[in-house]
Amino acid sequence: MKQHFPLKNAQQEKRIYRNRIFISAGIVAFFLLLLIVRYAYLQISHYDEFSTASDQNRIRLQPLAPARGYIYDRNGILLADNYPVFSATMSRADVDDIDGTVQRLIPILGLTQEDIDRFSSRIKTSKKTERVSLKLNLTETDIAKFSEVKFQFPGVNIETQMTRYYPHGDLFAHVIGYVGRINDKELKSIDKDLYAGTNLIGKIGAEKSYEELLHGVPGNESVEADAHGNVLRNLGRKDPIRGNDLYLSIDYGLQVVATEQLAGRRGAIVALNPKTGEILALVSSPSFNPNLFVTGISTTDYSALRDNLDQPLYNRAVQGAYPPGSTIKPMFGLGGIHYGYVDWNTAISDPGYFTLPGDSHRFRDHKKAGHGVVNMHKAQNVSCDTYFYVLSYRMGIDKMNTWMRQFGFGEKTGVDLPSESTGLYPNPEWKMRTRKSKWLKGETISVSIGQGAFTATPLQLAMATAITANQGSHITPHVLRESHGAKPYTPINAPNGKIQFNGQPEDWIKMRDAMVDVVDTGTGRGIRTPMYKIAGKTGTAQVKSIAQGKKYNESLLTERQLDHGLFVGFAPAENPEIAIAVVWENGKHGGSAAQLARPIFDYWLLKREKNPIRPAAHQISGGLMTAGIKPGELPSGTPPVTGAAHPNQPQATTQAPALTSPQQVQGE
């Protein structure tokens, strides 16, 4: 009998269906439980942590760079300004592929390898949300090209930033210096919080010396941003504090006059107030345009400056070390009186040369036939070398060194400008240490007339001259007169001491009178004036040695082998208001250098108050151009400046030219 099975087993299907429901419900319940546990983990156990992280992704604290303090001359003429420029910026929080984004921006923004290297160094050490500049000073073309493809670069923005501008170009380059983009070495030493959002830092000059005062204090603002880093709204703000304004002791008009004297020449001029040490003018010629360095100088421009034979980047006034020649004879003569080796009546017979006992070598005077009978006064007036040869033989190099260092030779003056040279006042210990040989008596003779290994900077010569004008009272040369702003400033106090002198007070007066006669009847008589009395001393320093028995023949020398001309002086002689040092490289003789000093004396004493030199209205020189600001226009908020022509009112260090140290001086 055949068995029949039902086509459908309802009970079994119900059981399978029920089992599947339980399994599915179990799976759903399990995952729901996991979700609940996860929510509890995020919302309860780690609420504070993840809430903060969320806000950090949405709300950012962006640094606000402070405006740099302005720099003015003593009369309120603006010397260093701030201008807005457009900059391409990005942060690590907004851009995932920094390197790839930079590479794609190269053809659009015209990025150079220098731009990329600077950006790469800064972005590595920046805070995650800090916006770092990729390129400063974008042109209108750069902005237009980027605007067309902005959607392809989320997180890259064009922002307005303040940068430095020097409206007078090369006129004050070696005094003010310049700012430049922060480099790798500086990144390691600066306070990164203080420089957050800032690209520039003082490199040389007053910009570097007073960086702390000029920089200011950064602020910040809290903003809400989207996933691409675009700011949606501002939530709060702490304003930055602008840097201090500096008022320098430099006088614009005097700087112009001094610069005109060295136009087309190589050399330096320093003028200062002998009573206070304030530097009134400081010129190094040739100069350079500091605006080239602000947003990053091109390789071509830098190479042109670096390789220039005239070395425009070299600050001759502060760093240049020259044989001072006969300009140091007044100071040295007072040393002979101090030690009692000579007095004003001590006289010698000058045959035109001097020989050391037992030595046939002749140390020649610049006048071959000699000057006859010479005392201290006449020795200064005619610049008799032989007189000082004799004095140095009696005094000896150790006493000479001790005495002359009191005038600042061989030491830094303490000026508030960086990279100052010490010059060199040599002695036996120095020679043994550096050259491993003994001092020779003939070297003492050469040093006595500012030759041999003796070198001094124009600033040192100006300071020593001011000390002489002050009858021994020291000064500290400085360019900062006062500072206004949030940070306190302690002004430099001068004078600060007095030379230890065993002579009489009248000896200083007699030396002054001898220096007056130098200008009235002696080697500096070409600048005599009836309007006031000038006390001065000329000097000539040889560049090319002349062999014993040979005659100096200017016609056989190249232009750069000609003697340097030097002059130091102060006026009015009875109550000095200004002391000057002039160094004219290859100027042939000191009389020529004295000619450059006369217009400077005239302007300061006769013309400054009645007919002061001021910059022309809207005078803007240099090469800065921005996409939004044209030369001559100013950003809003620029403070008015009294007496100025501001529109709202108005390292590579190179080596000095090699200077030889012969034993003869020609044509004081």
Image: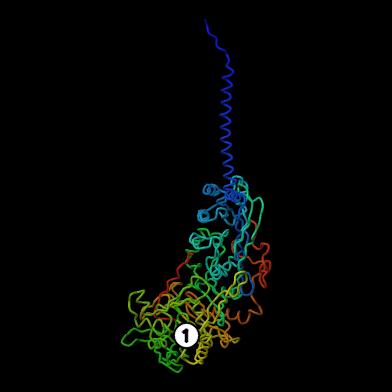
* Image label count: 1
Residue 625 seen in render: no
Report crowding for label 1: few under 14, some 14 to 19, many 20 or more residues within 10 A (C-alpha): many
The residue nearer to you, when weighing 512 against 337, is: 337
Q: Pinpoint residue 88: horizontal percent, then vertical percent.
A: 59, 53
**Colour mode of the rendering:** rainbow
Q: Residue furthest top?
A: 1
Front in this rendered view, residue 322 or 143: 143
As displayed, is residue 287 above or below residue 60? below
| Outermost residue to the bottom | 345
- Which residue is under mark 1? 331
Q: Quadrant of residue 611?
A: bottom right
Residue 208, image x, y percentages? 53, 68
Q: Is residue 143 above or below residue 84?
A: above
Q: Quadrant of residue 80?
A: bottom right
- What residue lies at 65% left-to-right and 58% top-to-bottom? 237
- Please give left or right for residue 42 compared with residue 455 in the image: right
Q: Position of residue 29 (x, y in %)?
A: 58, 34
Q: In this view, which residue lies farthest toward the left?
A: 358
From this view, report whether residue 378 is shown above or below residue 651.
below
Q: Nearer the viewer, residue 208 or 594?
A: 208
Instruction: Say if residue 437 shows up in the picture.
Output: yes
Q: Position of residue 183 (x, y in %)?
A: 50, 60
Residue type beneath disc 1: Met
Q: Give the structural element (helix, strand or loop) at label 1.
A: helix
